[in-house]
């Protein structure tokens, strides 16, 4: 006999509707979101490609051709832009759906009634945002090769780079969960100006962090941004001759950001869901 207890909006079931059912529900919800993304693939790609495309073209192609930056700058820039696209892609695709779900569409109510723990709904949101971030980062690699001159990555680096992108996207998704559950919907425009822009320009995506020694205060600010460690990990793998933060520090910070912001974000999600 199955017993069910309800507290607020959270429903828990005993053993027959237990871990197996929760896992199947979790993957079904995640797969549904993936299918919806597939149906909206072109708008999604346009969203994640346009801004980094022009950044690569202007800074890596135009300014290089005009002689305002060195010819090797493109090799430094591309890893940072790929890191930026994965991190911010995951962050935005976690934050925005949450804000809409909790305010306008109320789709979140259907997910909260699904036979799985409420915290798993939050984890699914982070994981789905990270998947979008991974795709956003991946599509920039061939685009970068086409735009930039004399830039290529060895095949042996693809697996480490993929793992870095995955970690960076998960960190971005976790931070997106924190923002999406703490920023009121009416403040969303302010959020992009106050949070998103500083994240973009203090993430060492357009310059190596170690090169900021003559601008120490800004180097300290950049060190507080988890995106810096994603960018530096990419460069450590792809342009190791450029001074960079040691890989073990980059990996430690990325894993720590996933754990810390994931825990804070899930706690915030539970608070919003049970209100």
Image (spheres, rainbow, N blue to C red):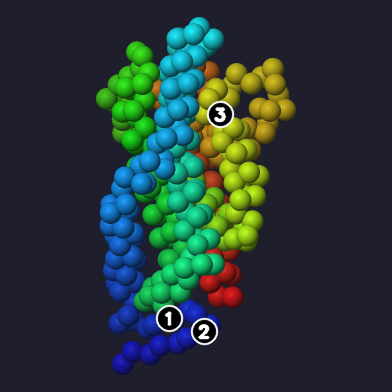
Instruction: Report the residue marked by disc 3.
Output: 204
Measuring 44% from the left and 81% from the top, which residue is drawn there?
A: 11
Instruction: Report the residue marked by disc 2.
Output: 7
Would residue 225 be found to the left or right of residue 21 on screen?
right
Separation of residues labelled 1 and 2 (CA atoms): 8 Å
- Callout 1 touching callout 2 (CB < 8 Å): yes
Where residue 22 sits in the image (x, y, percent)? 34, 71
Which one is earlier in the sequence, the residue at label 3 or at label 1?
A: 1
Mark number, residue 68: none
Which quarter of the figure is the C terminus placed in? bottom right
How many C-alpha atoms fall within 10 Å of the one at disc 3: few (<14), some, or many (≥20)? many
Mark number, residue 12: 1
Measuring 56% from the left and 29% from the top, which residue is drawn there?
A: 204
How many C-alpha atoms fall within 10 Å of the one at disc 2: few (<14), some, or many (≥20)? few
Which one is earlier in the sequence, the residue at label 3 or at label 2?
A: 2
Which quarter of the figure is the N terminus placed in? bottom left
Measuring 36% from the left and 25% from the top, which residue is drawn there?
A: 144
Where residue 10 sits in the image (x, y, percent)? 48, 79
| Residue 11 vertical placement versus 183 (above, below) | below
Separation of residues labelled 3 and 2 (CA atoms): 46 Å
Secondary structure under badge 3?
loop
């Amino acid at each position: 006999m199955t017993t069910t207890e309800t507290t607020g909006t959270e429903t828990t079931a005993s053993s027959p509707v237990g871990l197996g059912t929760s896992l199947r529900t979790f993957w079904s919800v995640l797969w549904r979101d993936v299918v919806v993304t597939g149906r909206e693939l072109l708008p999604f790609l346009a969203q994640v490609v346009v801004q980094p495309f022009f950044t690569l073209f202007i800074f890596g192609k135009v300014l290089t051709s005009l002689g305002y930056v060195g010819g090797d700058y493109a090799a430094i820039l591309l890893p940072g832009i790929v890191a930026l696209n994965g991190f911010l892609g995951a962050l935005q695709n976690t934050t925005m759906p949450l804000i809409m779900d909790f305010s306008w569409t109320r789709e979140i109510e259907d997910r909260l009634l699904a036979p799985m723990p409420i915290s798993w709904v939050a984890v699914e949101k982070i994981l789905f945002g990270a998947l979008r971030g991974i795709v956003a980062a991946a599509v920039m690699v061939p685009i970068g090769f086409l735009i930039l001159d004399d830039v290529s990555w060895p095949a042996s680096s693809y697996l480490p780079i993929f793992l870095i992108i995955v970690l960076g996207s998960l960190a971005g998704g976790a931070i997106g969960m924190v923002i999406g559950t703490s920023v009121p919907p009416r403040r969303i425009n302010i959020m992009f100006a106050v949070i998103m822009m500083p994240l973009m320009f203090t993430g060492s995506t357009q310059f190596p962090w170690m090169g900021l020694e003559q601008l120490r205060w800004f180097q300290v600010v950049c060190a507080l941004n988890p995106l810096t460690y994603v960018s530096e990990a990419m460069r450590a793998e792809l342009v190791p001759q450029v001074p960079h933060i040691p890989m073990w520090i980059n990996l430690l910070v990325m894993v720590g950001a996933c754990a810390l912001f994931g825990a804070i974000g899930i706690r915030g999600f539970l608070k919003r869901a049970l209100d």
